[in-house]
Image: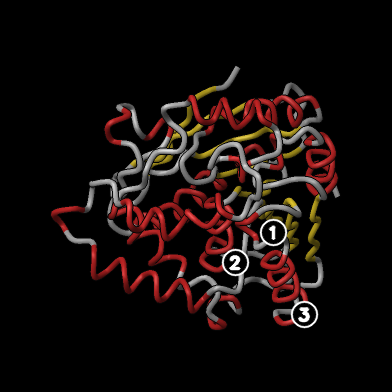
Amino acid sequence: MAEIFETTLHDGKVLKGRKWVAKEAKANLVFITGMDEHSARYEGFAKFLNENGVNLQVIDHFGQGLNCPDVKDIQKWPKDAFVLTLEGIEKTREEAAKNGLPTIVGGHSMGSFMIQGYLQAYPRADQKAIIMGSNGGQKGLMSIAYCLASMMIHKGNWDKPNPTMQNLGLGGYAKAIKDRKSDLDWLSYNEENVKVYAADPYCGAMNTGGFWKEFLKGMKEIWKGKNLRKVNTTSHILLVSGEDDPVGQMGKGVRWLENTYKVKMGISDTKAIIYPHMRHEILNEDEKLGVMEDILAFINK
């Protein structure tokens, strides 16, 4: 059974999430979800990790899951939400590590971009990070998108759904899947997973203007050379992604990250695993056990 935990930030804001505790734990994984989803979706992953001696804590983003008690407030973000989330990851990691066990950080999709930023904001020697369903190398595009968001979004429409930014930000993912049965097919080949996601009121909601402005404000920073150079070169980084994931440009963006970390930044222990016949949610595909086993091997090494 999952326990609910809370992490209080320096300004008093609280980020909540779910924690699954192993009976005989030998490591901790602090993980953060993707966009438009929530921590309860990671129960299957938690079961696998717990059975193999790993505690799992999954943080919900602002405006998602446990941080959104009323669905009418879904995807509402405060100002500076990106950097506040990085603080939340670090404080959750610090608390988890008090049991004296090795503590790894990780994130999926939007959470994976947060982990990229986290490695820059909180560099430490020999830290391990799992970057799942991610992308890289779009610094210019993110800067242009942030400029557009800054022109469009203001106090009056901050908490209102923004279909223009939503289409620009996510619309291409659906179009990348030929012969799709629904616009959510980019999530996974597993049709049942797509149906469950579509039926969940806490998944797939349209993002607010404030969300887009704050998310893009963080995104435009993470691939700048001066920030990439902040990552500790003794870090251990595992990149995992589906070969048919449009978020990672069908593997191209993941390979860019691998090359940037390993070759350009000198982080020698960087490894990318790109899984054939998998899309974005690799933990929900039919062959997900292989993904989980690769993650466990990384945690244990």
Residue lying at 61% horizontally and 68% vertically, measured from the top left: 136
At label 2, counting other C-alpha atoms closer than 10 Å, the crowd grade (few under 14, some 14-19, many 20 or more) is: some
SS class, disc 2: loop
The type of residue carrying mark 2 is: Pro
Q: Residue farthest to the front?
A: 179
SS class, disc 3: helix
Mark in front: 3 vs 2:
3
The quarter holding residue 54 reads top right
Viewer-nearest residue: 171 or 214: 171
- Please say if 219 is above or below 107: below
Mark in front: 3 vs 1:
3
Residue lying at 59% horizontally and 76% vertically, measured from the top left: 228
The quarter holding residue 153 reads bottom left
Which residue matches tag 1?
127
Which residue matches tag 2?
123
On screen, residue 75 versus residue 152, left or right, reads: right
The type of residue carrying mark 1 is: Gln
At label 1, counting other C-alpha atoms closer than 10 Å, the crowd grade (few under 14, some 14-19, many 20 or more) is: some
- Please say if 285 is above or below 263: above
Point out residue 177 in the picture as x, y percentages from the top left corner.
Answer: 64, 50
Point out residue 29 in the picture as x, y percentages from the top left corner.
Answer: 66, 41
Residue lying at 35% horizontally and 42% vertically, measured from the top left: 75
| Image marks 2 and 1: residues in contact by CB distance under 8 Å | yes
- Checking the image for residue 263, the label placed there is 3
SS class, disc 1: loop
The type of residue carrying mark 3 is: Val
On screen, residue 195 versus residue 171, left or right, reads: right
| Image marks 3 and 1: residues in contact by CB distance under 8 Å | no
The quarter holding residue 149 reads bottom left
Cα gap from disc 3 to disc 2, whole angstroms? 18 Å
